[in-house]
Image: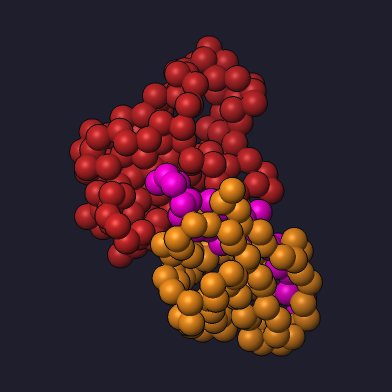
Chain colours: A orange, B red
Amino acid sequence: EDQVTQSPEALRLQEGESSSLNCSYTVSGLRGLFWYRQDPGKGPEFLFTLYSAGEEKEKERLKATLTKKESFLHITAPKPEDSATYLCAVPAGNNRKLIWGLGTSLAVNP
Amino acid sequence: DTEVTQTPKHLVMGMTNKKSLKCEQHMGHRAMYWYKQKAKKPPELMFVYSYEKLSINESVPSRFSPECPNSSLLNLHLHALQPEDSALYLCASSQDFLASVWNEQFFGPGTRLTVL
C-alpha cells in the first residue's frame, strides 16, 4: 500500500539551531516528491520537487534531498519566520492522486 | 507569477443556503483541483479538472458541485451543506494532469467555510 510518513510530528528549535525533517515513502515507481510549507489557516506553499534519488535542491535556509526510500528537508540556522507545518507528498503508484504525509509542525523560538 | 486566487476568504452559511467558491489562475495551467482540509490534517482531494473536463470526482457528496467555465476559472457550488463540511477549501492548479511527469501543484490561500 502506498504510504508517506513524516517525522517528527512536531519539532521545536532555537533560532540558529539546524535540524532535519524526514519524509519516508513506500510507493511503486516514484514519479516525484513534493515539499510544501503551510502556515496556519493558509494554503500550502510549494517549496521543492525532487524526481530521482540523489537529487538535491536548495532555497535560502532549506535544502531538500532524496534517496530511494526517503527525503530530508534540512533547515540551516532557522529563524522564527520558518515556523510552519512542512508537508511532503508523492504521487500514488496506481492512480492520479497525491499521497500526503501528516506533516511536521516546526516552531523556531527567538 | 505563481499565484492562485480564491474568493471569498471566509464564508459562513446555514444548512439551507446556496453559495459558491471561486478560484482563478493566470499561469496557463491546464489542471485545476479542489481540496478540503480539516485542522491538523493534510489536504484531501475532491475534484480534478483537466483541460476544462472533470477527470476525478473522489466520491464527493452531490451537495458539492464543481464547475470549470474556462481554463482559468474554477467554481465550487455549495448547497444544503452539513456542519461537518466546515473546513478550509483549497484550490490548486498545475501545468498538466495527464502528463507522464508529475508537475507541482500551486495552491491558493483557501476559503475558510463555516456551516451553521
Return the residue nearer the eye: A82 or A3.
Answer: A3
A62 in magenta: no
Q: Is residue B72 left or right of residue A69?
A: left
Above/below status of B60 relative to B24: above
Q: Is residue B58 above or below residue A66?
A: above
Residue occupying image coordinates x 63% and y 86%: A76
Q: Nearer the viewer, residue A110 or B67?
A: B67
The answer to whether A88 is drawn above or below residue A55 in the figure is above
Residue B45 position, x and y percent, is 48, 40
Residue in the image at 62% along x and 66% along y = A23
Is residue B14 in view? no
Residue A7 left/right relative to A33: right
Judge by depth and name the residue closer to the eye, A88 or A47.
Answer: A88
Measured along the vertical axis of the image, is residue B16 above or below residue B93? Answer: above
Image quarter for residue A104? bottom right
Give residue B40's position: percent from left, percent from top: 69, 48
Q: Is residue A96 magenta?
A: yes
Task: State which quadrant residue A70 falls in.
Answer: bottom right
Segment colored magenta: A88-110
In which quadrant of the rendered image does the C terminus of chain A lie? bottom right
From the top left corner, tell me how far across and down residue A95 is, in percent.
42, 44
Q: Nearer the viewer, residue B69 or A72?
A: A72
Q: Residue at x 60, y 20 (%)?
A: B82
Can residue A22 be spotted in the picture?
yes
* Residue A11 placement (x, y as % from top left): 76, 69
In percent of the image, x 64 and y 23: which residue is there? Answer: B83
